[in-house]
Image (cartoon, rainbow, N blue to C red):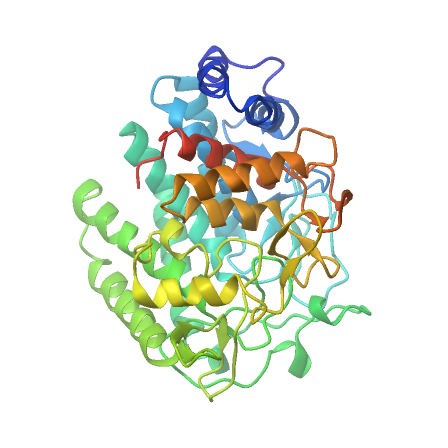
Amino acid sequence: MAYKKIPASVEKLMKAVTEKSIENPRWAENFNASFSNTLLTTVKKQEDNTTFLLTGDIPAMWLRDSTAQVRPYLLVAKEDKDISDMIAGVVEKQLRYVNLDPYANAFNEEANNAGHQDDDTEMNPWIWERKYEIDSLCYPIQLSYLLYKETGRTDQFNETFKEAVKKILALWKTEQNHENSPYVFERDTWREEDTLVNQGKGSPIKVTGMTWSGFRPSDDRCVYNYLVPANMFAVVVLDYLKDIYTTILKETDLIEEITTLREEINQGIEQYAKVKNQAGETIYAYEVDGLGNYSIMDDSNVPSLLAAPYLGYCSEEDDVYLATRKTLLSKENPYFYEGKCAKGIGSSHTPENYIWPIALAIEGLTSPDKSEKKRILNLLVENDGGTNLMHEGFDVDNPNNYTREWFSWANMMFCELVLDYYDLRIKK
């Protein structure tokens, strides 16, 4: 593990939050436990100056989770070179994994054949799991860009980065017409969410301009394989890439390709992802197939529809977003649960009536209302199962029933909401 004790810069931020939380001591208690937990339990610096990050209770590194796990530390990275180097090491590790296989979502620390090696797809000893998810490719770009925005650092935009970007662009363009894709995925399992239909190719779709995804960020399969919030995230990071190549790298060879792909995906969202809710209002669907089928729902993991402003796709005040938000935080969303202790958004990935702290944090992070943020923070600390940490999901009627005692992503999303409440935000 990289950290035997908490760095002074992190201690300083924890102290500042504690001082701000005099009227909310439970927030500080949980913040300090969560903010230190990721550094002390999941970060593993490698001899090659990369950083491997355990997701928590699974001995693998997810491209998605690892970004979210270190994102709040960006606030101290500009004054602590060691933290900055640790985050840059995460980016380098992520991008090397992307270059190894851009269709994989989770990787081993070494080529040890751990994970789901029996899946019917192109596995290798480095890959823990090969469920293709658009967001797995968005998150490393996002982290590299936010590191630059927060610190001014640019050495992460190296040859590894450039190679990964070319692979990502090529894959997203291929998956605009999934008929041309080499990717298939099947798992011998009783759980239908863990395998793709149609001999591993997924459900029928029409070409829309959007790019195809096999799985959601919950690692559950898509029903209709144009995952709208993931395509929104792709639009955002393509804007990041345009800025990186224009203002930092000053290399123009990919600008046209990046711009065209961004516009095609966004046009696909505009044309195919807007549907009507039960009240007849225009909202974003969660998934569509371009053939007229769609799902009105949201999932707890990010990217989600609820997270669209958090990701940078739209404003919190956007009319379609507000109508979508109202729909998602209602019974029209089949994964919205309400019980004696809490209400919020759950997932197909966890039992019925279990809601996720990640989704609650996003609900707070996308609200302009401080009283609403406060309500959610109180809800989170009151439903931590007596652990001072967050979990994957918990029972709305009994928070002592929860999944994943050690889940670093959820811990850091709670921390980010606390920081946001005190107007301590990462530059975007």
In this view, the residue farthest toward the right is 190
- Give the position of the N terminus as an image quadrant: top right
Tell how many labels. Answer: 0
User: Residue visible at 55% across and 69% down?
Assistant: 297
Residue 226 left/right relative to 387: left
Q: Is residue 171 visible?
A: no
Q: Position of residue 184 (x, y in %)?
A: 61, 73
Which residue is found at the position 20% from the left and 64% from the top? 256
Is 372 on the left or on the right of 188, as rendered?
left
Image quarter of residue 319: bottom left
Judge whether 410 appears above or below 268 on screen: above
Residue most extreme to the bottom: 291
Query: Which residue lies at the image location 55% right of the left edge and 86% below the top edge?
Result: 204
User: In the image, is 403 to the left or to the right of 39?
Assistant: right
Instruction: Report if residue 386 is visible in the image.
Output: yes
Can you say whether 341 is above or below 3 in the image?
below
Q: Nearer the viewer, residue 114 or 413?
A: 413
Residue that appears at 60% across and 12% down: 5
Looking at this rendering, what residue extends furthest in the top direction? 8
Q: Quadrant of the C terminus?
A: top left
Of residues 4 and 385, which is closer to you in this image?
A: 385
Residue 308 is situated, as x and y percent measured from the top left of the image, at: 40, 57
